[in-house]
Structures are given as C-alpha cells and as structure tokens.
Image: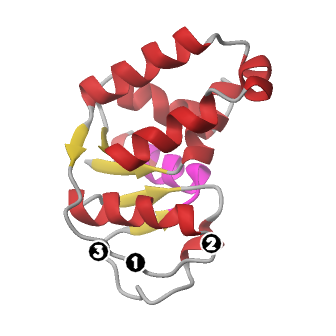
Amino acid sequence: MVITLDTNTLLAALLSQAGSSHRILRLIIQEELKLAISTPVLFEYEAVLKRKELLDKMNLSPGQVEDLLDLLVLLADKRSVYYRLRPNLLDEKDNIFVECAFSSNSRYLITSNTKDFHFGRLKSHPFQVLTPGNFYSLWRRDHA
C-alpha cells in the first residue's frame, strides 16, 4: 500500500516513539508500507527536520537526519510531478503533498492537520486524508 506523509507526521515520529506516527514510520522502514516521495516533498522534509530547534528536540544531528532521509528515499515510491495540481489549500506548502499523493496513487495522505486538506478546489481526490492515529487504527484492524 502506498501512502504519502505530511511533514508533521514524520516530525512527530521522530519526536516520540510512543505515538502512531512512529509506528507508521516503523512500518515504512520494515517495508510493510510504501512511502510516496517527490523532490519537493523531500526538500520540505529536509528543511523542516534540519531546523536547529527541532534537531535539539529530536536529539538528532543533521547527519542522522540525512541518513534517515536517504533510507526513506531508498525505500520510497519515487515520483516526479510533471504538472501542478493546485487545489489552492490554505497553506500553499500542503499542495506538494496532494500532488505527490495524486501522482503516486497513494491510498492515504497522513497528516495531523486533516482540516487543512478539506479546502480548495480538489474535492474528489483518489486518496483519503487521515490522521496518524486513524490510519494506524485502520492498519491494525486490517492487518491483525
């Protein structure tokens, strides 16, 4: 199953090992889920995760973040987006996740900010937008 992760889900996974976000990251690393990634999404991950204040909170070095991102790229369903699918979301930076999810045929776009993805022109998209907790509950139900 292919999924797309918003940066906030990846960040939450690195901040705490106790939550659903971390469990989802582990499923990706164990190759039970396939992460869709595009160049803009990768650059967004890197820009956010390498912020000094977040590195301190995650207790990681920039090199460790690079290693994780390299692993995710190695395991990922890599996508080139040749068009701009602009649903005009409230946060312009969220559009890259919609583009990635759409071009990769992701079943789910996982984000802590689901309300941010219910605005704009894209009303009927081929993927569901779920919180990490809702996605992980669904995953556990279907894979128990």
Q: Residues within 10 Å of mark 2 (few under 14, many from 20)?
A: some
Q: Is residue 141 left or right of residue 113?
A: left
- The Cα atoms of the two marked residues, 2 and 1, are separated by 14 Å
Circles 3 and 1: CB distance less than 8 Å?
Answer: no
Circles 2 and 1: CB distance less than 8 Å?
Answer: no
User: Can you identify the residue that label 2 sits on?
Assistant: 116
Query: What amino acid is found at the position of numbered circle 3 in the picture?
Result: Pro
Q: Nearer the viewer, mark 2 or mark 1?
A: 1
User: Can you identify the residue that label 1 sits on?
Assistant: 86
Identify the residue shown where x is 28% and y is 66%.
102
The disc label shown at residue 106, or none: none
If you read the primary sequence from the N terminus, does the residue marked by circle 3 or circle 2 appear first? Answer: 2
- The Cα atoms of the two marked residues, 3 and 1, are separated by 15 Å
**Image location of residue 120, percent across then percent down:** 51, 86
User: Can you identify the residue that label 3 sits on?
Assistant: 126
Range of residues picked out in magenta: 130-140
